[in-house]
Image: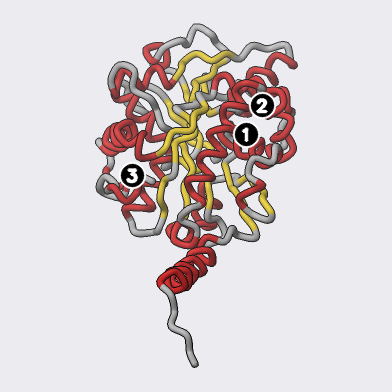
């Protein structure tokens, strides 16, 4: 004789049916690789991996450096890079063009500086008649600098010479060789230039803090949310619960990096192929943060609107909608 199923048994069976599929979908990935540029926010990634803060998120966790924007875009397109620190303008462009990128957070409120061998070049008005190297054509540093030059009434090619370089290192080499007067570079490249010059008995100094200059354009107190962590839509769909945990781990790592820059620099030096002393010196100048994208949306939209004034194609022709911000 078949015994009737009690209400409790029925509820238990129903809960099991629901729980098993959810567990399967939420199972952590076997491998989690975080990619980042050779810029200071990647120190946070490297430290988060080395310190074990990300160990609960996957069986194996790794950090790797992408060396130029073309490599990063190719990795996203091919699917070999799914969790990537990138310029926020690039992330917006990819999203609005339907290429499946969503922004998790902002990891720096700006780390760009103009450095020069002549400390008297302290101000945009002093750049008139001079030469300036700018790395990464058609990327955030160039977009920001074009907007700032326009704000100060300077026209490239007329009021000053602007030379594009493939990387910040190339810009520094031109500066140290005396072939240009100033260079726009991110951290840790700015710190590297200052330290390399000092070792050679020369002087290189930060003459313009681009973050402060940006606030003159975007409004008092405006941040420059330059780069953040983005994930592919495929990754987010496969691991919807992991994104929040990843952000929380990186937020804790950011606090640790700012509190103990020497330890964080040691964790990242090998991946960066730079002396730990350079990275340590760069951290206080890098405005490292961990702000959820949805919280940073007003500052991000200010950045997007401002750079798009010259060319809307920079962000894919329109502002990203709410789906971009995680």
Considering the numbered disc 1 on the image, is that residue within a helix, a strand or a loop?
helix
Residue 287 can be seen in this image: yes
**How many numbered marks does the figure carry?**
3
Q: Residues within 10 Å of mark 1 (few under 14, many from 20)?
A: many
Distance between mark 2 and mark 3 Cα atoms: 30 Å
Camera-near label (2 vs 1) is 1
State whether residue 59 is above or below residue 266: below
Residue furthest to the bottom:
1
Res 31 → quadrant: bottom right
Tag 2 and tag 1, C-beta contact below 8 Å: yes
- The residue closer to the viewer here, 24 or 139, is 24
Q: Residue at x 54, y 16 (%)?
A: 116
Q: Secondary structure at mark 2?
A: helix
Label 2 packing within 10 angstroms: few (<14), some (14-19), many (20+): many
Q: Measuring 66% from the left and 23% from the top, which residue is drawn there?
A: 261
Residue 43 numbered mark, or none: 1
Q: Secondary structure at mark 3?
A: helix
In this orientation, which residue lies closer to the viewer: 305 or 9?
Answer: 9
Residue 103 is situated, as x and y percent measured from the top left of the image, at: 41, 46
Q: Earlier in the sequence, mark 2 or mark 1?
A: 1
Residue 211: name its quadrant: top left
Instruction: Give the spatial CA distance, label 3 vs label 1.
Output: 27 Å
**Which residue in the protein does label 2 denote?**
279
Bin the neighbour count of mark 3 within 10 Å (Cα to Cα): few under 14, some 14-19, many 20 and up.
many
Residue placed at 61% from the left, 39% from the top?
45
**Is 152 left or right of 56, judged from the image as shown?**
left
């Amino acid at each position: 004789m078949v015994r009737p199923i009690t209400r409790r048994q029925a509820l238990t069976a129903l809960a099991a049916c629901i729980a098993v599929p959810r567990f399967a979908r939420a199972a952590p990935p076997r491998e989690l690789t975080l990619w980042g540029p050779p810029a200071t926010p990647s120190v946070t990634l490297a430290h988060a991996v080395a310190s074990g803060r990300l160990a609960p998120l996957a069986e194996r966790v790794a950090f790797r450096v992408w060396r130029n924007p073309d490599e990063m875009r190719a990795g996203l397109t091919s699917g070999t890079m799914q969790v990537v620190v990138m310029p926020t303008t690039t992330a917006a462009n990819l999203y609005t063009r339907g290429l499946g990128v969503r922004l998790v957070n902002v990891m720096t409120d700006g780390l760009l500086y103009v450095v020069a061998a002549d400390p008297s070049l302290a101000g945009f008005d002093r750049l008139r008649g001079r030469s300036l190297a700018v790395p990464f054509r058609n990327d955030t540093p160039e977009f920001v600098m074009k907007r700032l030059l326009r704000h100060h009434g300077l026209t490239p090619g007329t009021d000053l010479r602007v030379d594009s370089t493939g990387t910040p290192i190339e810009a520094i080499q031109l500066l140290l060789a005396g072939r240009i007067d100033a260079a726009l570079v991110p951290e840790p490249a700015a710190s590297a230039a200052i330290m390399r010059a000092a070792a050679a008995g020369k002087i290189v100094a930060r003459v313009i803090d681009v973050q402060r200059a940006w606030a003159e354009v975007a409004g008092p107190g405006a941040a420059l949310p330059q780069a953040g962590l983005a994930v592919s839509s495929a990754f987010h769909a496969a691991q919807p619960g992991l994104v929040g945990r990843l952000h929380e781990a990186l937020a804790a790592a950011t606090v640790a990096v700012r509190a103990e820059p020497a330890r964080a620099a040691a964790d990242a030096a090998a991946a960066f192929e730079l002396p730990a002393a350079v990275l340590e010196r760069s951290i206080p100048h890098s405005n490292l943060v961990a702000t959820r994208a949805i919280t940073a949306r007003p500052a991000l939209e200010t950045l997007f609107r401002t750079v798009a004034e010259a060319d809307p194609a920079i962000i894919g022709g329109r502002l990203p909608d709410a789906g971009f911000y995680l």
